[in-house]
């Protein structure tokens, strides 16, 4: 087909659009809404996924973990008897190959305070190594991170509030008087403590809320007063599981008295919930967990990596395992056959399930939106073709071939899709701008669900710019619109020319 003929066909399609303005505008609006909603929903889910993955790697799992096969198979049960020892040479090999490592012993227990109790997952850690791999030690809300050799713990702020440990964020007038103001020695100290709180304006009941602009020195003063009053003393109750030589599991009840020295408040809700960290070295003998050098996992991350970077090829489990085996072989050490490196995704099944479910839901919604748009375009073109059946017969009788008529209608529908996608991209981007800059605050929901809702975001759900989708949605919408014109046009062209001319 000559270019000049094609230009004439495009011009004819444009004239047809202007002749049916109302139907054209309605169809363009349907396409625009579909495209705009797709960009908005896709960007929002992509933003939550990217932020969650960053927070998982930077605060929770690292890039990978080294565990025994037996432990990994039942990892959700936290089987402490499937631990391993002599991890130091392994850590040395990995560090020589550019990795930072942190040993952990993970166990369940109950934490008792003077105000109640709560089930807690305890991480026995090396404070220095933990800080080199994960970033939550930098997010101690008040207090400090525990020191080696001390029976000290840091606690997620949700668990701390449940056990009434640390500085409360919301409290009644009675609790303010009994728990905090009673700690003041002078009137000046009482005023300092009272000045940390403001009266809530959005509640029917009288409540005091911790000021967001409270001075750190004043908060630290109150923390020290609580510490001196013994309100930070807690007790760990747990069961030590030991596998005997015959394979039987012995259960030993253990009580450990510790001091809370800090509260975790980081961007990962899992760490803010029922989690506590205690130095690994104090749990080695009978006063602790009788670990005798055992750990349940080694957390691995590349040295000097950026917190906003997801694990790269160097941090792939197979690559880490290969480096480890080569290094151990070069040192002449026995190769541990039951130790395997597992990637971070193996430990976040809750996030994977939620993310996959949302992606499927997103796709279903978008498919439905495009079906509506497709039906709208097909309906518009069907009405246009039926109303112009005489015109089609006239064009055919004047010598215009069927393929040219078909092409006119396809171009007409494609132009509707193109214009609709252009408006939709603008609409989607306009909606996405405040979502990227400000997001939506879901902190109340996160607090209500105690951080257990799959995504690793504590408050603001922000969107992101998914440029491949933004630039790719236009051609897709245009193509779908063009296809929407095929059926009604082909149907009309099957009529004989004489019937088309007599059509009413």
Image: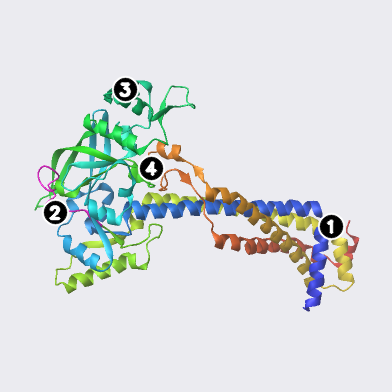
Element on which disc 3 rests: helix
Which mark sits nearer the N-terminus, 2 or 3?
3
In this figure, which residue is indicated by the disc labeled 4?
A: 452
Q: In the depicted view, which residue is nearer to us: 67 or 195?
A: 195
Find out whether the residues at labels 2 and 3 contact each other: C-beta distance under 8 Å: no
| Residue 486 placement (x, y as % from top left) | 72, 64
Q: Which mark is residue 293?
A: 2
Q: Residues within 10 Å of mark 1 (few under 14, many from 20)?
A: few
State the CA–CA distance, disc 2 to disc 3: 51 Å
Front position among marks 2 and 1: 2
Q: In the depicted view, which residue is nearer to us: 4 or 205?
A: 205
Q: Residue at x 26, y 31 (%)?
A: 226
Front position among marks 4 and 2: 2
State the CA–CA distance, disc 3 to disc 1: 83 Å
Residue 235 lies within the magenta run: no
Element on which disc 2 rests: loop
- Which residues are the magenta region? 284-298
Q: How many marks do you count on the picture?
A: 4
| Residue 350 placement (x, y as % from top left) | 38, 49
Q: Is residue 211 left or right of residue 118?
A: right
Q: Is residue 420 above or below residue 122?
A: below
| Residue 251 placement (x, y as % from top left) | 14, 42
Which mark sits nearer the N-terminus, 2 or 1?
1
Q: Residue at x 17, y 61 (%)?
A: 88
Q: Which mark is residue 187?
A: 3
Q: Which mark is residue 8?
A: none
């Amino acid at each position: 087909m000559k270019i000049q003929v094609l230009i004439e066909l495009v011009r004819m399609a444009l004239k047809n659009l202007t002749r049916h303005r109302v139907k054209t505008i309605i169809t363009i609006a349907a396409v625009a809404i579909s495209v705009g909603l797709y960009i908005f929903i896709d960007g929002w889910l992509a933003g939550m996924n990217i932020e969650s993955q960053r927070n998982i790697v930077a605060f929770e799992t690292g890039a990978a973990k080294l565990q025994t096969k037996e432990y990994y198979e039942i990892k959700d049960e936290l089987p402490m008897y499937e631990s391993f020892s002599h991890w130091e040479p392994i850590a040395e090999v990995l560090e020589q190959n550019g990795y930072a490592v942190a040993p952990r012993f993970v166990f369940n227990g109950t934490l008792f305070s003077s105000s109640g109790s709560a089930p807690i997952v305890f991480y026995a850690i090396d404070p220095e190594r933990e800080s080199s791999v994960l970033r939550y030690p930098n997010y101690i809300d008040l207090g400090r991170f525990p020191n080696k050799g001390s029976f000290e713990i840091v606690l997620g702020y949700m668990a701390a509030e449940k056990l009434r440990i640390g500085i409360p964020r919301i409290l009644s007038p009675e609790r303010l008087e009994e728990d905090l103001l009673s700690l003041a020695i002078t009137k000046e100290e009482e005023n300092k403590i009272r000045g940390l709180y403001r009266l809530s304006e959005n509640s029917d009941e009288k409540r005091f809320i911790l000021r967001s602009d409270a001075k750190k020195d004043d908060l630290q003063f109150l923390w020290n007063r609580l510490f001196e009053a013994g309100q930070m003393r807690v007790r760990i109750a747990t069961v030590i599981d030991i596998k005997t030589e015959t394979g039987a599991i012995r259960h030993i009840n253990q009580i450990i008295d510790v001091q809370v020295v800090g509260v975790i408040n980081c961007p990962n809700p899992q760490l803010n919930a029922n989690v506590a960290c205690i130095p690994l070295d104090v749990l080695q003998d009978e006063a602790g967990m009788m670990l005798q050098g055992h750990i349940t996992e080694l957390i691995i991350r590349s040295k000097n990596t950026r917190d906003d970077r997801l694990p790269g090829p160097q941090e792939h489990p197979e690559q880490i395992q290969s480096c480890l085996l080569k290094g151990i072989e070069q040192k002449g050490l026995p190769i541990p056959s039951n130790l395997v490196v597992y990637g971070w995704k193996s430990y976040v099944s809750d996030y994977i399930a939620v993310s996959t479910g949302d992606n499927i839901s997103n796709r279903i919604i978008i498919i439905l939106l495009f079906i509506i748009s497709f039906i709208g375009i097909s309906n518009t073109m069907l009405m246009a073709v039926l109303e112009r059946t005489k015109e089609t017969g006239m064009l055919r009788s004047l010598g215009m071939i069927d393929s040219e008529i078909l092409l006119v209608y396809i171009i007409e529908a494609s132009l509707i899709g193109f214009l609709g996608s252009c408006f939709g991209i603008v609409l989607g981007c306009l909606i996405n701008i405040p979502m990227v800059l400000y997001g939506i605050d879901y902190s109340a929901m996160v607090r209500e669900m105690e951080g257990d809702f799959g995504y690793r975001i504590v408050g603001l759900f922000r969107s992101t710019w998914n440029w491949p989708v933004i630039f790719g949605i236009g051609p897709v919408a245009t193509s779908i619109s063009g296809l929407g014109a095929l059926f009604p046009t082909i149907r009309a062209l099957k009529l004989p020319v004489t019937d088309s001319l007599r059509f009413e």
